[in-house]
Amino acid sequence: MTDTSNPIEPVAPASTEPDPATPGEEVGSPDVAQASPGGPGFDTDRRQFFRRFAGELLTGAGQVVGVVTELRDRSAAEASALLGQPTGSGATVVKSGVPSAGAGADSLDEAGAEAVTPAGFRTPFRFESDDVLLLIDQRRLPDQLVEVPVRSANDAARAIRDMVVRGAPAIGQVAAIGLALTAKRAAKAQAHARRAILDGAANILRTSRPTAVNLGWAVDRLMARYEEIGKLSDQGREIADALWSEAMAIVDEATDDHGRLAEAGQSILPAPEGRPLRVLTHCNTGPLACGQFGTALGIVQAAHARERPLHVWVDETRPYLQGARLTAWELRQAGVEHTLIPDMAAGPLMAQGQVDVVIVGADRVAANGDTANKLGTFTLAVLAQRHGIPFVVAAPLSSVDLSTADGAAIPIEDRPAIEVTELRGVRIAPEGTNVRNPAFDVTPAGLITAIVTEEGVLRAPYDRSLQDAMTRRNGRREPRRPYALEPAKPVGAAF
């Protein structure tokens, strides 16, 4: 038995007026607001939001607190400013339904309204109320701003599976919040019914995407809290409050961890004389993928905040174009010099001496350091080793899976063929062409120069350095935790 919920539908981003709806009231309007592009009247302070945010982490990365409360309780006007939305009348409103996964996520809305390019820095999610989480629909960027409501684990699983939200850290946070929202909805159910609802919701979330370890880790952590209270407890409100607090802790810890990671990564960056540092990155590892700071892109943004001259080569990242659509967009908003390149241009650039360091993220790091990341990462690692270029993985320890011995044991997700045969709704391959579309590949630990975590820069042998880092992190958090940070996976867990 699982919870039931309304189908995911887009809603208009917050207006500049306080929301008159009471907490838990469902959004009735299917309108989608498009943010106006930057221009003469655009507030440049918003464009520099990320730069200031990154700068703040350099003076207090270890003391980031209250972020979740701020996200939850921020007024509608402040949320609009955070999202870079216009405060005037420049928004274009169109009627639209969420595009189906099979129809091409970037297709134009049915009304045929002109798309207006969003401008301004954005986090991947925010709270409309205590009962509604709003996700930026990343399938629509960079052309359209659409926010999708999540009211339950079912909604969260659908958003994760359909890539409304993506990036391992963000997926984990959204999964935790989705499960906590379902616990709220089940607070008044009988104990046995509540157990069936939460167990079913947890399983749906675990199987929504198999490679990113943060997903299963976050769900298991909330279910461990449920076990601690007692699966058959009659205290439905106590259970809901405990799971909500745990989800908020995951978001808060992620913010702290990514800030620490971004600061630690500064020491791994080469320091060329007389010219900008040239960084190559793959896929998207900024705030949209991670939460507040980003991982690999967080290191870049922190360097930018320190006013280090740098230039970023952005792999387009076929077939889903996360680099072209998302990374280039985020770097533009942050004012970081960058150039978009076809994936296959990376090798020639390395051969020409145009790349100083490759920095990528991770969806799962095995106990021996083997790393699963977006398809194409392994190729970059081989090329980097061939040309003597440091290849760096930036990953919070929540992406490390010590129960997976090596990369051979990491499940690799296969995505739909349409992502390869079509581009923005236009078929680019002969009809009926056979397709294999693995979303990830595995880079052997021997090709990785260093792994940057919130506990510092780790070097080989990774089986030892990863375990030591995990011990340090747990020790740092133990005084605040009466229970294990790494709960054992329940029977029947997908991974």
Image (tube, rainbow, N blue to C red):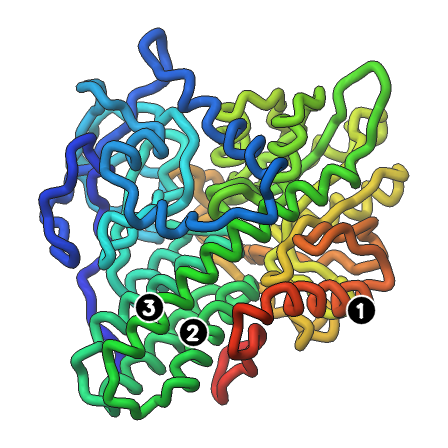
The residue indicated by pointer 2 is: 222
For the point 23% across and 74% down, which residue is it?
Answer: 3
Q: Residue at x 56, y 83 (%)?
A: 488
Q: Which mark is residue 463?
A: 1
Q: Is residue 401 above or below residue 94?
A: below
User: Which image quadrant for residue 487?
Assistant: bottom right
Q: Is residue 334 left or right of residue 404?
A: left
Element type where label 3 sits in the image: helix
Q: Position of residue 245 (x, y in %)?
A: 38, 66
Q: Count all numbered tags in the image, as a single digit.
A: 3
User: Can see residue 416?
Assistant: no
Mark 3–mark 2 distance (CA, rounded to whole Å): 8 Å
Which residue position is annotated with label 3?
180
Q: Is residue 39 above or below residue 361?
A: above
Image quadrant holding the N terminus, namely bottom left
- Cβ atoms under marks 1 and 3 closer than 8 Å: no
Q: What secondary structure is marked by label 1?
A: helix
Q: Badge 3: few (under 14), some or many (20 or more) residues near its Cα, within 10 Å? A: many
Give the residue type at disc 3.
Answer: Ala
Q: Position of residue 405 (x, y in %)?
A: 73, 75
